[in-house]
Image: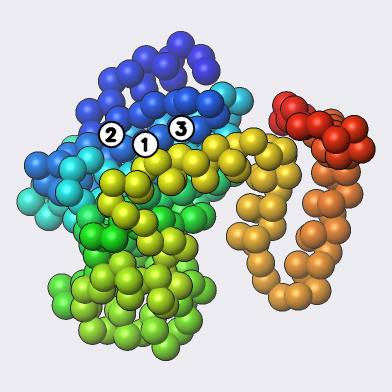
C-alpha cells in the first residue's frame, strides 16, 4: 500500500480497521448514534475497502458495528454533513453503493443489534450475512415517504423472493433475527457473544482457500444472468483458473495428502 493511501487510512474518524491473518475487519464506530451513516463514513468505507481490495494482505472483509447496533441507517440529524459537497458529488446512498459494489474479495456482514434503513440495505451488498440473536431488521422507506435505496429493490428479492420483499418494504415493519433467518435474509443466527468469533472463523476459512478462485467464484455468482450465459461465464473462469499456481498446488497437495499453501497466483 503506498504512503499516500496509508496516511489517508490512518486519519479515519468514523470506522476502525484491523487486519490479521488475511482478514480485514471494518467496524462502524459511531456508537453514540447507533453507527448512523454519514458521507464521511461512506467516504472512509470506500477508501478502506478499495485500498485493501488491492492489497495482498487482505483476502476477506468483515463489516460489523460498535456497541448495541450495526447501523441505524442514514443520520438524518447529520444531513448537513454533506453540505460541503458540490451538486455533482454522490449522495450518501450512491457513495455507499460505490464503496461496496465492485469489491472483488468476499465481504461478511457481522450484524450486531439493529440494522435499519441504509444500515440494512448495506448488508444486502455484502456476500454473507451473519446476525446476532438480538439483531433486528427494518426497511422503513415507505413509512418515511421515500423510496428504497442502495439497489435493495434488486438485492432484496434475490434473497427473500419478490413477495416477501414487497411485504418488508411496503409494511416497513421490524423483524427479528429469527424471522430474518427463516426468510433467507441472513445466512446464520448466532449468539451475541459469539458473533464476531464465528464471523472471523468463517472469514479465516475462506481466506485459507485459493484467493483467485474465491474472487472468480464471487464475481461469477454476482453476475448471474440466464443459464446459458452463466454456463459460458463459468467455463471461461474455469479455463483461466486451471492455469493458476494455486490450482496446481491444490491438485498437488491432494495427491500428496498434505495441506495446500496458496499464494494468490
Q: Nearer the viewer, residue 111 or 192?
A: 192
How far separated are the C-alphas under marks 2 and 1?
7 Å
Q: Which residue is mark 1?
A: 26
Q: How many marks?
A: 3
Seen in the picture, residue 174 relative to 149 is either above or below; the reply is below
Q: Secondary structure at mark 3?
A: strand
Seen in the picture, residue 192 relative to 31 is either above or below; the reply is below
- Within 10 Å of disc 1 (Cα), the crowding (few <14, some 14-19, many 20+) is many
Q: Which residue is mark 3?
A: 24
Confirm or deny contact between disc 1 and disc 3 (CB under 8 A). yes
Q: Secondary structure at mark 1?
A: strand
How far separated are the C-alphas under marks 1 and 3?
7 Å
Name the residue rendered at 21%, 73% in the picture. Answer: 174
Q: Secondary structure at mark 2?
A: strand
Seen in the picture, residue 43 relative to 55 is either above or below; the reply is below
Please state if 196 lies on the left or on the right of 215 as rendered: left
For marks 2 and 1, the one nearer the N-term is 2
- Within 10 Å of disc 3 (Cα), the crowding (few <14, some 14-19, many 20+) is many
Camera-nearest label, 3 or 2: 3
The disc at residue 15 is 2
For marks 3 and 2, the one nearer the N-term is 2
Amino acid at each position: 500500500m503506498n504512503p499516500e493511501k496509508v496516511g489517508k487510512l490512518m486519519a479515519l474518524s468514523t470506522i476502525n480497521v484491523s487486519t490479521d491473518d488475511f482478514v480485514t475487519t471494518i467496524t462502524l464506530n459511531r456508537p453514540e448514534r447507533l453507527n448512523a451513516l454519514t458521507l464521511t463514513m461512506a467516504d472512509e468505507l470506500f477508501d478502506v475497502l478499495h485500498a485493501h481490495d488491492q492489497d495482498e494482505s487482505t483476502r476477506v472483509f468483515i463489516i460489523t458495528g460498535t456497541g448495541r447496533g450495526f447501523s441505524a441507517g442514514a443520520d438524518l440529524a447529520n444531513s448537513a454533513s454533506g453540505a460541503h459537497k458540490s451538486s455533482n458529488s454522490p449522495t450518501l446512498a450512491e457513495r455507499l453503493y460505490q464503496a461496496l459494489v465492485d469489491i472483488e474479495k468476499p465481504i461478511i456482514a457481522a450484524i450486531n443489534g439493529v440494522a435499519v434503513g441504509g444500515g440494512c440495505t448495506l448488508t444486502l451488498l455484502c456476500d454473507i450475512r451473519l446476525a446476532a440473536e438480538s439483531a433486528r431488521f427494518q426497511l422503513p422507506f415507505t413509512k418515511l415517504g421515500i423510496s428504497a435505496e442502495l439497489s435493495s429493490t434488486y438485492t432484496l428479492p434475490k434473497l427473500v423472493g419478490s413477495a416477501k420483499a414487497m411485504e418488508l418494504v411496503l409494511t416497513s415493519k421490524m423483524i427479528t433475527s429469527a424471522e430474518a433467518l427463516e426468510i433467507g435474509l441472513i445466512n446464520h443466527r448466532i449468539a451475541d457473544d459469539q458473533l464476531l468469533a464465528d464471523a472471523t472463523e468463517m472469514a479465516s476459512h475462506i481466506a485459507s482457500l485459493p484467493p483467485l478462485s474465491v474472487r472468480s467464484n464471487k464475481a461469477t455468482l454476482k453476475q448471474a444472468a440466464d443459464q446459458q450465459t452463466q454456463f459460458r461465464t463459468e467455463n471461461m473462469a474455469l479455463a483461466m483458473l486451471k492455469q493458476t499456481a494455486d490450482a496446481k498446488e491444490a491438485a498437488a497437495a491432494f495427491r500428496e495428502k498434505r495441506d495446500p499453501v496458496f499464494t494468490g497466483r
